[in-house]
Image (spheres, rainbow, N blue to C red):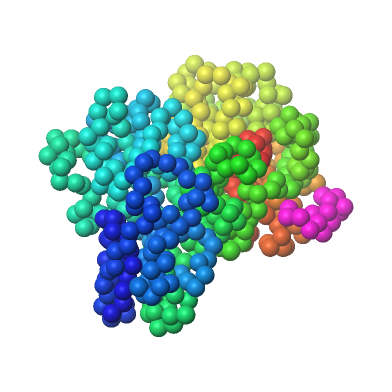
């Protein structure tokens, strides 16, 4: 008979009973529960604890019972455990992880929209988690927050029965706790069941890009004595290797920051669907005194190696990285001039030209041919995929109206619009041709634009692609399958600029970690051909734009970070 030590709250008991079931199913063993009251269970007043004070707040007495031999196994919420080992004890298994995301709970009458944060701007959200409070300030600063204590059913009851000036519009809870207590029928207290017959209670999972969960949130940890080999062997049968791997990514970052469970830190790791890689959402609040950015920051990072992913995230959080940026010559020259304003007193960022843009000569005959082909069309979509194209058009034509006159687009064309893949290019198009509609890809790629363009692909529509001669043609080829008229004018070509040998040596031979930002697929190819991407251990590849990221993956490379929109300045500000 295995003795399981647990707290006596509804949630703790639900977790312990889940472990009892696993012991019986996977190890064929019976067990009994030993309820232990911890210091955390005895405090009712709302408080925020520093990391040192929080250590062992809900675990110390349980661990003492293990050491004293009064129990064989302790069941913990892994997110509540300090990262430092307890002498004489070991975490022998991580059996499962359920509903790791945070959940916003509110009455339907307080809902004003269908997306995060669901409640109105003057709403109060109750939570005693500094991590959650910090992210609410970061994502929804207009919301007010207040403390709340008690177990999960108590918190729900306090919210439901609050009214007037003390009304609580929503509470943030762990999804795992809600799932476990829902399964046992203990989520809602009897005292509010009548009220909830007339008022709908809503549970909405908060996606990690809005609120990053605590490291190992939703994960159970089974602890036992280090010298109890029979129990260790038994618990190994319950361990889930995937849960262990992902939790290790998250808690490695937590341990590196020397933080406790109440640090304003969120880390949520997942295996990337369809790729042999791991991704992690990361949030660190400005409340953390050692935050090098001195501001709240969210990021999403990926790597093919889970240990390396955790190490690189920690490296990025603790010290300013050395960043080399590679892009078009003109843009790199402009960026170098702007850097003192973007990052004052920072010499860690170095832009280098990797390709040059060479405008193509477009003959009068080409313009005439395009104009004749567009003349019968009722709708014309002008497709542009880079700011270089817009720059060249601006140099040739004073504005969008002049360009459309050159194309023969007059009042008989009832619908003229633009299409592009990124916000930056869209902004430049707007400057060139104010007032016209612009279709923008949902995910920053040409594939993300295809569905909308195909919906317009009929005999009355002409698609004019003003593109690079050596650019990707997948979208053009896809549209040719439809009845629309597809026209293409190469506006420019790109040429690779050899990278200086001393620069290559500086990057490869420097002992500091190097981050390389590729601004386009051709820049990426230049880096690879120059030998800069041969050491995946030492080089951190960053990609500007999803198309560059797709190209990297096709080359067998895995970017650590991707900027969805090709905006160098925004990426630099966010990265630093």
The residue under the point 83% across, 54% down is 506
Return the x and y of residue 116 as percentages of the image width and height: 38, 36
The residue under the point 21% across, 53% down is 186
Q: In this view, does 268 lie above or below 25?
A: above
Q: Can residue 248 be seen in this view?
A: yes
Q: Name the image quarter holding residue 167.
A: top left
Return the x and y of residue 21 as percentages of the image width and height: 27, 71
Q: Name the image quarter holding residue 357.
A: top right
Q: In the rendered structure, does residue 505 fall within the stretch colored magenta?
A: yes
Q: Residue furthest right?
A: 502
Return the x and y of residue 147 as percentages of the image width and height: 38, 37
Q: Give the range drawn in magenta.
A: 498-514
Return the x and y of residue 261 as percentages of the image width and height: 48, 52
- 138 or 549: nearer the viewer: 138
The residue under the point 38% across, 68% down is 65
* Left or right: 168 in relation to 552: left
- 320 or 570: nearer the viewer: 320
* Left or right: 278 in relation to 526: left
The residue under the point 72% across, 62% down is 534
Q: In this view, does 15 lie above or below 88?
A: above
Q: Is residue 477 visible?
A: no
Q: In the rendered structure, does residue 451 fall within the stretch colored magenta?
A: no
* Left or right: 248 in relation to 386: left
Position of the N terminus by quadrant: bottom left
């Amino acid at each position: 008979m295995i003795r399981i030590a647990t707290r006596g709250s509804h949630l703790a008991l639900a977790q312990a009973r889940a472990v009892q079931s696993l012991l019986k199913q996977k190890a064929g063993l019976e067990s009994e529960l030993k309820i232990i009251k911890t210091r955390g269970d005895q405090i009712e007043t709302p408080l925020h604890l520093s990391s040192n004070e929080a250590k062992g707040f809900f675990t110390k007495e349980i661990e003492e019972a293990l050491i004293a031999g009064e129990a064989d196994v302790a069941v913990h919420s892994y997110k509540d455990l300090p990262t430092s080992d307890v002498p004489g004890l070991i975490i022998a298994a991580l059996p499962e992880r359920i509903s790791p995301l945070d959940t916003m709970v509110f009455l339907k009458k307080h809902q004003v929209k269908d997306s995060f944060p669901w409640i109105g701007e003057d709403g109060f959200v109750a939570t005693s988690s500094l991590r959650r409070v910090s992210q609410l300030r970061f994502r929804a600063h207009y919301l007010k927050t207040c403390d709340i204590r008690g177990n999960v059913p108590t918190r729900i009851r306090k919210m439901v029965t609050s009214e007037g000036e003390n009304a609580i519009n929503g509470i943030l809870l762990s999804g795992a706790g809600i799932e476990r207590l829902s399964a046992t029928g203990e989520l809602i207290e009897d005292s509010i069941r009548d009220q909830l017959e007339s008022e709908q209670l809503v549970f909405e999972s908060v996606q990690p890009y809005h609120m990053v969960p605590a490291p190992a949130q939703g994960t159970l940890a089974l602890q036992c004595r280090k010298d109890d080999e029979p129990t260790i062997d038994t618990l190994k049968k319950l361990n889930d290797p995937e849960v262990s791997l992902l939790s290790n990514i998250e808690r490695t970052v937590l341990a590196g920051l020397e933080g406790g469970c109440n640090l304003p830190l969120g880390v949520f790791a997942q295996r990337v669907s369809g790729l042999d890689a791991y991704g992690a959402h990361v949030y660190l609040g400005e409340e953390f005194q050692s935050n090098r950015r001195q501001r709240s920051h969210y990021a999403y990072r990926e790597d093919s190696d889970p240990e390396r992913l955790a190490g690189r995230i920690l490296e990025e959080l603790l010290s300013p990285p050395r960043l080399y940026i590679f892009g078009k010559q003109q843009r790199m020259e402009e960026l170098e001039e702007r850097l003192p304003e973007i990052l004052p007193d920072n010499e860690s960022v170095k832009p280098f030209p990797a390709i040059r843009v060479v405008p193509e000569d477009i003959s009068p005959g080409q313009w005439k041919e395009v104009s004749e082909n567009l003349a019968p069309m009722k709708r014309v979509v002008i497709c542009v995929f880079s700011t270089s194209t817009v720059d060249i058009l601006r140099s040739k034509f004073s504005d969008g109206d002049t360009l459309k006159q050159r194309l023969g687009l007059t009042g008989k064309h009832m619908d003229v619009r633009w299409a592009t893949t990124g916000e930056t290019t869209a902004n430049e198009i707007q400057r060139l041709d104010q007032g016209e509609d612009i279709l923008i890809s949902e995910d920053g790629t040409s594939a993300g634009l295809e569905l909308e363009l195909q919906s317009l692909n009929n005999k009355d529509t002409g698609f004019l692609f003003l593109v690079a001669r050596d650019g990707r043609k997948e979208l053009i080829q896809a549209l040719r399958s439809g009845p629309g008229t597809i026209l293409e004018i190469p506006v420019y070509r790109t040429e690779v600029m050899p990278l200086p040998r001393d620069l290559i040596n500086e990057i490869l031979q420097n002992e500091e970690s190097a981050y390389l930002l590729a601004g386009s697929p051709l820049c990426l190819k230049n880096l690879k051909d120059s030998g800069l991407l041969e050491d995946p251990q030492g080089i951190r590849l960053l990609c500007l734009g999803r198309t560059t990221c797709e190209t990297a993956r096709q080359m067998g490379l895995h970017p650590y970070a991707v900027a969805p929109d090709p905006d160098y300045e925004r990426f630099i500000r966010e990265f630093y």
